[in-house]
Image (cartoon, rainbow, N blue to C red):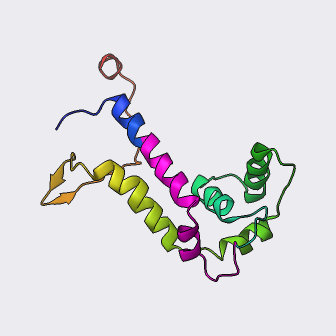
Amino acid sequence: MEKHTLVDENDKATRSISIIRELLNDDKFKKEHRTASKFFSRNLKLNFVAVILLILQKSIKPLQLVLNEFFKKLDNGTSVTKSAFTQARRHLKPEAFIILNQKAVVDVCYAEGNFLKIWGFRLLVIDGSKIYLPESPEIKDE
């Protein structure tokens, strides 16, 4: 398997962002992924796009801080409460994120089939373990 260059990865990231932007601005996508037709029908502070973008940020900061930073970046002088965000989030169907992942990540990154497979399956590995090695000259040299 060939190594991907940084240019290839940047191109994939650009395509993914473009697809996400296109989907989020598509009225059909919005209508299909809200829990009822009355939700996200007006252009409020917490509109469909803002709620999805806030969720996609997946920050570990306190929610109110994330909301304040988000709306400060928009520079529209508004702010919203945690409660308002929580209520708006309830009106999204989870399938919206499944579709976003499929079209913007899976289709872009794996469409070419240029990845390793084991027994016909794509293998993804995440290892968060840490190994502490003893201090020795040999380990330092290595």
Q: Residue extending furthest right?
A: 77
The residue at 33%/55% (across/down) is 107
Q: Nearer the viewer, residue 137 or 18?
A: 18
Picture quadrant where residue 26 is located? bottom right
The residue at 64%/53% (across/down) is 60
> In the figure, is residue 33 to the left or right of 121?
right
Q: Which of 101 and 29 is in front in this view?
A: 29
Residue 54 percent location from the top left of the image: 65, 57
Q: Can residue 53 be seen in this view?
A: yes
Q: What main secondary structure does the magenta stretch of the protein show?
A: helix
Quarter of the image for the N terminus: give it: top left
Residue 68 percent location from the top left of the image: 80, 51
> In the figure, is residue 111 to the left or right of 52?
left
**Is residue 105 depicted above or below 96 in this figure?**
above
> Is residue 27 one of those drawn in magenta?
yes
The residue at 48%/73% (across/down) is 95
Quarter of the image for the C terminus: give it: top left
Residue 48 percent location from the top left of the image: 66, 65
> Is residue 26 one of those drawn in magenta?
yes
Picture quadrant where residue 8 is located? top left
Q: Nearer the viewer, residue 86 or 138?
A: 86
Q: Residue extending furthest front?
A: 27
The residue at 78%/65% (across/down) is 44
In the rendered structure, which segment of residues is drawn in magenta? 13-40
> In the figure, is residue 109 to the left or right of 90?
left
> In the figure, is residue 83 to the left or right of 130?
right
